[in-house]
Image (tube, rainbow, N blue to C red):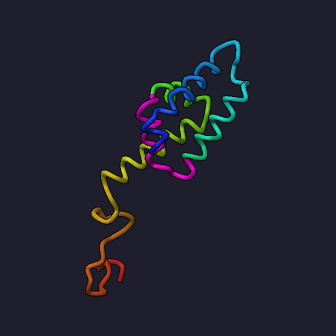
């Protein structure tokens, strides 16, 4: 929460964007470190950070998602988290038929 509250990702993402501009052409150590950090956030599914980065820096992420699978994956993780919040599994059936509770399955499968 400290990272999001104090806007500490803004200078990182700004530097990341500057390093992607010519003449750097993507060979910068800062790009590698930033992508590694974003991949860690995505894999760990740190929901607060995923939401913050994707909502505050969505333009940058979408612009370069085709070049970097990490950015594409982070945007996808954000979308998955939003869908999970909108349709929690506890309230919505998913993955198969709902049991009737009497031990009888689907009539055509017996």
Magenta-span inclusion, residue 52: yes
The answer to whether residue 74 is above or below residue 98 is above
Q: Residue 109 in the image: state x and y as whole percent.
A: 36, 79
The answer to whether residue 16 is above or below residue 105 is above
Say which of 27 and 65 sits in front.
27
Residue 70 placement: quadrant: top right
The answer to whether residue 24 is above or below residue 62 is above
User: Which contiguous range is marked in magenta?
Assistant: 42-58
Q: Residue 61 in the image: state x and y as whole percent.
A: 51, 30
Give the position of the N terminus as an image quadrant.
top left
Position of 106 with respect to 66 (left or right) is left
Say which of 6 and 52 sits in front.
6
Identified at 37% across, 53% down, the residue is 84
Q: Residue 13 in the image: state x and y as whole percent.
A: 55, 28
Magenta-span inclusion, residue 13: no
Give the position of the C terminus as an image quadrant.
bottom left
Q: How many marks?
A: 0
SS assignment for the magenta stretch, majority: helix
Q: Residue 10 in the image: state x and y as whole percent.
A: 50, 28
Say which of 105 and 28 sits in front.
28
Identified at 55% across, 46% down, the residue is 41
* Farthest-out residue, bottom: 103
Residue 26 placement: quadrant: top right
Identified at 29% across, 80% down, the residue is 107
């Amino acid at each position: 929460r400290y990272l999001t509250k104090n806007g500490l990702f803004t200078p990182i993402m700004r530097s990341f964007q500057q390093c992607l501009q010519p003449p750097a052409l993507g060979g910068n150590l800062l790009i590698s470190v930033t992508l590694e950090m974003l991949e860690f956030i995505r894999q760990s599914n740190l929901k607060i950070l995923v939401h913050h980065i994707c909502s505050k820096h969505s333009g940058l992420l979408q612009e370069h998602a085709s070049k970097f699978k990490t950015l594409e994956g982070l945007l996808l993780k954000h979308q998955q988290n939003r869908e999970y919040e909108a349709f929690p599994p506890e309230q919505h059936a998913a993955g198969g038929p709902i049991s009737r509770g009497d031990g009888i399955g689907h009539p055509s499968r017996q």
